[in-house]
Amino acid sequence: MAKRNAFISASRPVVTVNAKELLRELTSDRPNDKSMAMALRNLIEPKIKERQEELERKFEAHPVTVELNAGPRASNTSGALGGYGNLFSFIGFSSGDDPTKVISRIFEEKIRFKVQRAGKTGKYRVTFFIPSTEEIYGLTSIPWMTGKSWVKSLETGDLTNLGQYLYSAAGFSSSSSGTGIQATNKSSGVTLRRTPYVGKLIEDFKKRLLKLDR
């Protein structure tokens, strides 16, 4: 329960757009600002829901998500490790972990919006409360490296101290994931390739929100 409370209380940045184009779809005989705002909300809510569901689908279908969800014996289908081992054991998750679940929850639960009149202009402002990359980084810590996000590390290619990563589908008794270890005297020569992931998905989602009239 404590983890869920921490998740819900995470900060949310704001994106603001002018609803001028959307208002052209509404009749002009609304009796007051409140009813106009409600009409606008009813108009754009399904548009936002459509874009939110598209974001969720793209996240679930992303090669990194698919590979991590396949667990410690997955193939490196994302290509982030050059085909060797897999991201689940490389990052160091424990067998049974579900590292992408928290991101799925964020995309499902943390997208909100409100409608307000923009001063005396006769226009209305739609303000979106959406997850930020920093929020997601803060909730995706590497299991054995407090304060460092595995999502950010994938996006930047910055995951140090893993030059001795060794993978075996047969497994290692001392491995938390079951299939990957850090050896002190051997090196696989594996390097992590920068892979666009959550940051790009969020930026693409923002662009789609700014075009609600389409």
Image (tube, rainbow, N blue to C red):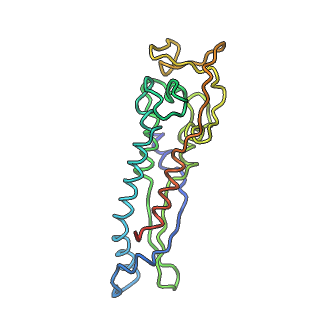
Asked which quadrant contains residue 212, the reply is bottom left
Residue sitting at 39 percent across and 81 percent down? 24
Between 87 and 10, which is closer to the camera in this rendering? 87
Residue sitting at 45 percent across and 53 percent down? 110
Does residue 65 appear left or right of residue 29 in this picture? right
Residue sitting at 59 percent across and 27 percent down? 144
Residue sitting at 44 percent across and 64 percent down? 113
* 114 versus 12 height, above or below: below
Q: Position of residue 94 (x, y in %)?
A: 48, 24
Between 9 and 119, which is closer to the camera in this rendering? 119
Does residue 58 appear left or right of residue 133 in this picture? left
Q: Where is residue 88 in the image (x, y as percent from the top left)?
A: 49, 28
Quadrant in which the N terminus appears: top left
Quadrant in which the C terminus appears: bottom left
Q: Position of residue 26 (x, y in %)?
A: 34, 80
Q: Position of residue 101 (x, y in %)?
A: 43, 39
Between 94 and 157, which is closer to the camera in this rendering? 157
What is the total number of numbered labels drawn onto the structure image? 0
